[in-house]
Amino acid sequence: MKGLRQKLLYDSRHIWHPYTSMISPLPCYHVKSASGVSLQLSSGETLIDGMASWWSAIHGYNHPHLNKAAHNQIDKMSHVMFGGITHDPAIDLCKQLLDMTDSNLTKVFLADSGSVAVEVALKMAMQYWHSKGEKQRKRFLTIKHGYHGDTFGAMGICDPVNSMHSIYTGYLPQNLFAEAPHIRFGEQWDEKDISSFKAILERNSKEIAAVVIEPILQGAGGMRMYHPQYLKSVSELCKQHGVLLILDEIATGFGRTGRLFAYEHAGICPDILCLGKALTGGYLTMSAVLTNDDVAETVSSGESGCFMHGPTFMANPLAAAIASASLELVNEGNWKTQVKSIEDVLKLGLNPLSDHPKVQDVRILGGVGVIEMKNPVDMARCQKALIQSGVWLRPFGKLIYTIPPYIVSKSELLKIIDTMGILVDIN
């Protein structure tokens, strides 16, 4: 196929991009390469990536340590089935994950993507109760404004009204949704904030398989940041009523909120933990589901004698080797000062925008900066302004936000902030 214009025309006619119309698609910009925090477009522009490729590229692009891990592994084997076979990349990765998470988490299931990790966690919880003879436990309790992925089980625990999945109402399982917490991170705690969750759990505890929640920071459901005591209370109530707790740390894991894992803000440990996105540093798709001895042994003692899930590309050696290299970088600890620096600069740059007449709210936590507008943003207008400004962001709904790679420099971050201000002005 000749020429960039022809390629982009073919793309617009035949290739379906995420959350994009095939009738009137938004323009797509052709990336020819990426390095550090920059995307190089074939049309000549260089963009500072303020999205870390949807939370994943925390170390930036084309990182030499990750590249070396990929090259070394691809010369040995790119893939081998995980049924009845094991390999060093999987063993090394699982050991790293268990070493860096709570000591109560002792078992690892490697899956394909964040959504699949959530599916695995839901199935794990249901099979747990089936093995215990409590087959009526088939519902899940979560909070409104949540987002857990695009597959059907995951959609069933996303916000049923405000999410992008509301059109599937009637087909999805009828799960339970408590009011989302209102008290924000850093505000004064009020026990009333947990009352909706507590009441629903008390009424339905015998039919609930697990509580599923994004800890501290809700992602694509609204980028809302809530008080750690809420999460601590959720954990205590789950223990009190004998309900499993699943934490979806796919977006928040590996330092994004200022702690290695967001559950650390509340000093708790889940029964099942979902990890993804930054796991491989943005190189390949992979996720992990961690759990404890009780869940693993109970599932394995049921009538099936095993956990009934087995992806074809489970524990893909290439992805696992890169993930191990990514976690080596995480374990060096530089992310702590990097994320704190990002948070400080975001606060200085974004907080003044809270007084803007078009702005509803400004929220910042760790390496996440959010501007909530009073009205939905014009995506086509935003994208044009972004390219002109030399910054890449992906606003949605009323939200203009940034989740940059940890290696972003202060000057690059200030340019991202300036561009967010431009988007506020033009919407």
Image: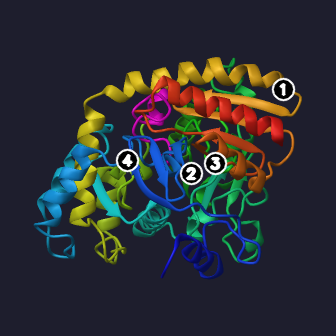
Residue to which mark 4 is pinned: 61
In this view, the mark in front (1 or 4): 4
Q: Earlier in the sequence, mark 1 or mark 4?
A: 4
Distance CA(mark 1)–CA(mark 4): 34 Å
In this view, the mark in front (3 or 1): 3
Label 4: element kind: loop
Residue to which mark 1 is pinned: 356
Q: Residue at x 34, y 77 (%)?
A: 303
> Is residue 242 in view from this perspective?
no
Residue 105 locus on image (x, y percent): 31, 45
Distance CA(mark 4)–CA(mark 2): 36 Å
Q: Quadrant of residue 329?
A: top left
Residue to which mark 3 is pinned: 387
Magenta stretch: dominant secondary structure = loop
Magenta stretch: residue 265 in it? yes
Q: Amino acid at mark 2?
A: Val
Q: Amino acid at mark 1?
A: His
Q: Earlier in the sequence, mark 4 or mark 3?
A: 4
Q: Residue at x 75, y 54 (%)?
A: 379
User: Does residue 201 appear left or right of residue 411 in this picture?
Assistant: right
User: Does residue 124 appear left or right of residue 326 in this picture?
Assistant: right
Distance CA(mark 4)–CA(mark 3): 19 Å
Magenta stretch: residue 178 in it? no
Q: Amino acid at mark 4?
A: Tyr
Q: Amino acid at mark 3?
A: Ile
User: Does residue 76 appear left or right of residue 4 in this picture?
Assistant: left
